[in-house]
Amino acid sequence: MSAATPQVLNWRVIVPFVLTGTIWGSTWLVITGQIDGVPAAWSVFYRFLLATPALFLVAFFMKRRLKLTGPEHRLALLVGIFQFSGNFLFVYHAELYVTSGIVALMFGLMMVPNALLARAFLGEKVQGGFMLGSAIAIVGVSFLLIHEWTSNPNAGVIGGNVGLGIILALLGILAASVANVIQANPTGRAVPMVSLLAWAMLYGTIFDLGFALLTAGPPPLPTNPNYWAGIVYLALIGSVITFPLHYNLVREIGAGRTAYNAILTISVAMLLSTVFEDYRWTSLTITGMGLAVIGMVLALRSKQRR
């Protein structure tokens, strides 16, 4: 048994691991209600407009220092732009074209850029077994994307196609992966996690506001109470609670191991897509889902044994 095993099996890892996976699995479906008749950019802004002050309050009541140094503010700015702007703006727009569960499944592949970026910037090694498992997972996800593409009658139309959604989702994955890795540097480790996230979310929210004004015009005010209920859920449950848990997991067990909760996340997301989005399973999608999960497990088990 490796020395890292007790750390991974510690309740401080298991509880946030299960919570983040389950909650984030549900958020993919909730997002679909945020982009139905409302510009995606404004929904992202509303989400973090509510989440940001709540996260500052969490940091205050936890008695974490909120005053950051210059380098710490610069890091928070980068995390904010990549995580709370780029990642979410790409994801919300991707779900205009691709089933929410499939976008969640694609994000399970974040382990690949996580590992490659950690290799480049943090010196973590990437083993052959990890690459083999990743390749199997990529093939599995490709099967589901092929089904998504062929079952969509507008797949070849620019502005309303699955291909555009796939590209947007991939850009969101890359942005989130960059945020994952850069916050794990020595500067990030010196800042209380909730404080770094609060400032990062503030910077991201400011960027989101500017982007929404430039691309979507004046802010809309939806009257559907379900829309605002979704904003509250995504902001407080899906962001304020889960992001500190997630990034603490990155610090505790590394970006690679933290990616394991993607398996739980995509399982919940695909279940909800099946129930609420009428996602149809075929032999191709069942095979793809199986290969994706098996590949992720193989890849992450290999990385765990490094």
Image (cartoon, rainbow, N blue to C red):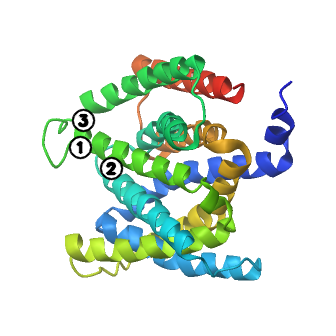
The quadrant of the image that shows the N terminus is top right
Give x and y (percent) for residue 131. Answer: 52, 21
At label 1, the amino acid type is Leu
The amino acid on which the numbered mark 3 sits, given as a three-letter code, is: Asn
Query: Is 231 located above or below residue 290 in the figure?
Result: below
Q: Is residue 76 above or below residue 287?
A: below
Q: Earlier in the sequence, mark 2 or mark 1?
A: 2
Which is in the foreground here, disc 3 or disc 2?
2
Q: Nearer the viewer, mark 3 or mark 1?
A: 1
In the figure, residue 246 lies in which quadrant?
Answer: bottom right
Confirm whether residue 198 shows in the render.
yes
x 13%, y 44%: residue: 158
The residue closer to the viewer here, 55 or 265, is 55
Q: Secondary structure at mark 2?
A: helix
Residue 220: x and y, percent?
29, 79
Cα–Cα gap, marks 3 and 1: 12 Å
Residue nearer the viewer, 105 or 153: 105
Whether label 2 touches label 1, CB < 8 Å? no
- Around disc 1, counting alpha carbons within 10 Å, would you say few (fewer than 14), some (14 to 19), or many (20 or more)? many
Q: Residue 164 bears which disc, if any?
A: 1
Dot 3 or dot 2, earlier in sequence: 2
Going by the image, does 188 lie left or right of 83? Answer: right
Q: Which residue is mark 2?
A: 94
Is residue 24 depicted above or below 288 in this figure? below
**Which image quarter is the C terminus in?**
top right
Q: Which residue is mark 3?
A: 152
The residue type indicated by label 2 comes to Ala
Residue 239 quadrant: bottom right
Q: Residues within 10 Å of mark 3 (few under 14, many from 20)?
A: some
- Label 1 near label 3: C-beta < 8 Å? no
